[in-house]
């Protein structure tokens, strides 16, 4: 009887379930959109019960679409939007409020205060993270402060905290398992990177009771059984943050392997194996995964606006009818005619970390056409990615010879060729676009013996296209000089 792995990809805008077979083929996909709530400017919230309902729905739909029997599911893997935080009642299983989404800035005041108290460097040394409301600790502090009686109830052991992996595991196991994995725990700002356990000094700083936190486990192991949803119990065998899942799905198992996901923003991760590298260039240090007590660490850099810049061309400037025509329009001109677009609409991320910077366009002349602006916007994605890759090289001392890519904008051949030219590295696009779900599936499959080891997984990797550098060094230097001038200009404005 053929078996399959069911991956749950719980994201910010939707929840998906994908069935994979032993050759990494997608057998069935089900997806449900999610609603985000914006109660105040800068605040982003979600209903955790809606996330749970969407998860149940897509799991059942995917199995039905595939036309398989439930006992053919060897294991379930879960990958999730990271840092999004929910607190729920241990007895009733009901959230005490809406979940605070990773993008939300509502807990910024706590971070500002701790910065003023000189705590940032100390926190960074312990956690590898910048002191920012992006991470879960300040979100949890906000919930405990703003829901009446929550702090006392938490101290009494009546409340539980979790990111979306913990929430779904708890629900799927009917409250038997309150756990997370090291990749997600490393994004809470409560876990010590060196001990891989919650840090007592950090818990005291944030005044968070340890009893409400999920137990930290390996990324690939059987945590418990999904029971009641299907007629048979199915092992839940991986929990992993979405970006780390994509790194695993791209088979970036060696030191110096890098992946870039061109989504709304760009998320770049470099595997640094057992080495914890504290960045001097504005990158974050996290856990990639832990398998059999062996830990791989990562350096991470985020570009805030990537695919969102293409959407801006379509919806804001209205010079594209649909995002997919950006490549054709960009190739209608020979070059960008000296135009540079810096799409820092929500500030600059790594390696600059200038949150108040606005976007800008440079080099406009009377001869500038829409096509030049479109081309320059695509090139901006490559320049920003190159800036993060240079920071990774400097921090790690490792050469980057190849870049594995996924995400919506990775379908744009012009972008990937320009990326290869600018970075002087091979850019490899995977045949399978759903590398995040695939990573969760691989990790779950390893835990139950569905796949033997990482070597077998590597044998399944298929590149749909490889882009190699094809630009004169002088032209590359000239283009990069122009980009540096543009970045410097927006930071002065």
Image (cartoon, grey):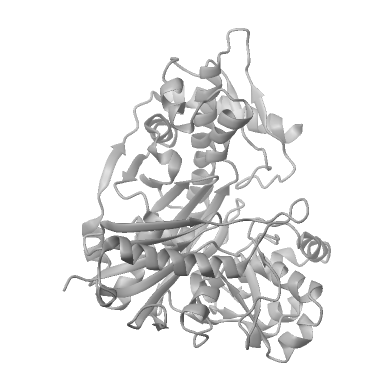
Measured as percent of width and height from the top left, residue 336 is found at 51, 19
Q: Is residue 25 left or right of residue 35?
A: left
Measured as percent of width and height from the top left, residue 194 is found at 54, 75
- Residue extending farthest top: 366
Whether residue 251 is visible, yes or no, is: no
Quadrant showing the C terminus: top right
Q: Which residue is pictured at 41% across the width and 20% down the height?
A: 331
Measured as percent of width and height from the top left, residue 178 is found at 53, 83
Whether residue 81 is visible, yes or no, is: yes
Q: Using the image, determine if residue 54 lies above or below residue 323.
A: below
Q: Quadrant of residue 380?
A: top right
Q: Is residue 32 left or right of residue 88?
A: left
Q: Quadrant of residue 274?
A: bottom left
Q: Using the image, determine if residue 360 lies above or below residue 69.
A: above
Q: Nearer the viewer, residue 206 or 421?
A: 206
Q: Which residue is pictured at 51% across the width and 22% down the height?
A: 478
Measured as percent of width and height from the top left, residue 345 is found at 67, 38
Total label count? 0
């Amino acid at each position: 009887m053929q078996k399959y792995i069911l991956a749950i990809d719980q994201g910010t805008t939707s929840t998906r379930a994908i069935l994979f077979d032993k050759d990494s083929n997608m057998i069935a996909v089900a997806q449900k959109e999610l609603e985000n709530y914006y109660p105040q400017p800068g605040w982003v919230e979600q209903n955790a019960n809606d996330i749970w309902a969407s998860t149940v729905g897509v799991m059942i739909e995917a199995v039905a679409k595939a036309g398989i029997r439930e006992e053919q599911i060897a294991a379930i893997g879960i990958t999730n939007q990271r840092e999004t935080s929910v607190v729920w009642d241990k007895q009733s299983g009901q959230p005490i409020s809406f979940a605070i989404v990773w993008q939300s800035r509502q807990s910024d005041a706590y971070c500002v205060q701790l910065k003023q108290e000189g705590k940032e460097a100390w926190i960074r040394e312990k956690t590898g993270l910048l002191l920012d409301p992006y991470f879960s600790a300040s979100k949890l502090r906000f919930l405990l402060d703003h829901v009446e009686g929550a702090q006392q109830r938490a101290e009494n052991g009546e409340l539980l905290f979790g990111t979306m992996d913990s929430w779904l595991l708890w629900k799927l196991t009917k409250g038997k398992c309150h756990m997370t994995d090291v990749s997600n725990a490393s994004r809470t700002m409560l876990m010590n990177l060196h001990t891989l356990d919650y840090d007592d000094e950090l818990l005291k700083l944030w005044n968070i009771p340890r009893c409400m936190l999920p137990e930290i486990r390996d990324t690939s192991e059987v945590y418990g059984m999904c029971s009641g949803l299907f007629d048979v119990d199915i092992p839940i065998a991986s929990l992993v943050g979405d970006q780390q899942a994509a790194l695993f799905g791209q088979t970036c198992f060696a030191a110096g392997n890098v992946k870039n996901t061109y989504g709304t923003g760009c998320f770049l991760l470099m595997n640094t194996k057992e080495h914890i590298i504290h960045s001097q260039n504005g990158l974050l240090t996290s856990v990639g995964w832990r398998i059999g007590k062996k830990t791989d660490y990562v350096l991470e850099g985020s570009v805030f606006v990537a695919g969102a810049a293409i959407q801006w061309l379509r919806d804001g400037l209205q010079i594209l009818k649909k995002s997919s025509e950006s490549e054709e329009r960009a190739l209608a001109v020979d070059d960008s005619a000296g135009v540079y677009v810096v799409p820092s609409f929500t500030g600059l991320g790594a390696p600059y970390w200038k949150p108040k910077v606005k976007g800008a366009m440079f080099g406009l002349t009377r001869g500038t056409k829409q096509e030049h602006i479109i081309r320059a916007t695509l090139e901006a994605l490559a320049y920003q990615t190159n800036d993060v890759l240079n920071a990774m090289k400097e921090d790690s001392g490792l050469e980057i010879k190849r870049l594995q890519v996924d995400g919506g904008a990775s379908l744009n051949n012009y972008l990937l060729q320009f990326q290869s030219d600018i970075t002087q590295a091979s850019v490899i696009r995977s045949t399978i676009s759903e590398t995040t779900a695939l990573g969760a599936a691989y990790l779950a499959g390893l835990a139950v013996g569905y796949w033997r080891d990482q070597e077998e997984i590597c044998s399944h990797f298929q590149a749909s296209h490889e882009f190699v550098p094809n630009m004169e060094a002088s032209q590359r230097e000239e283009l990069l000089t122009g980009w540096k001038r543009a970045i410097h200009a927006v930071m002065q404005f």
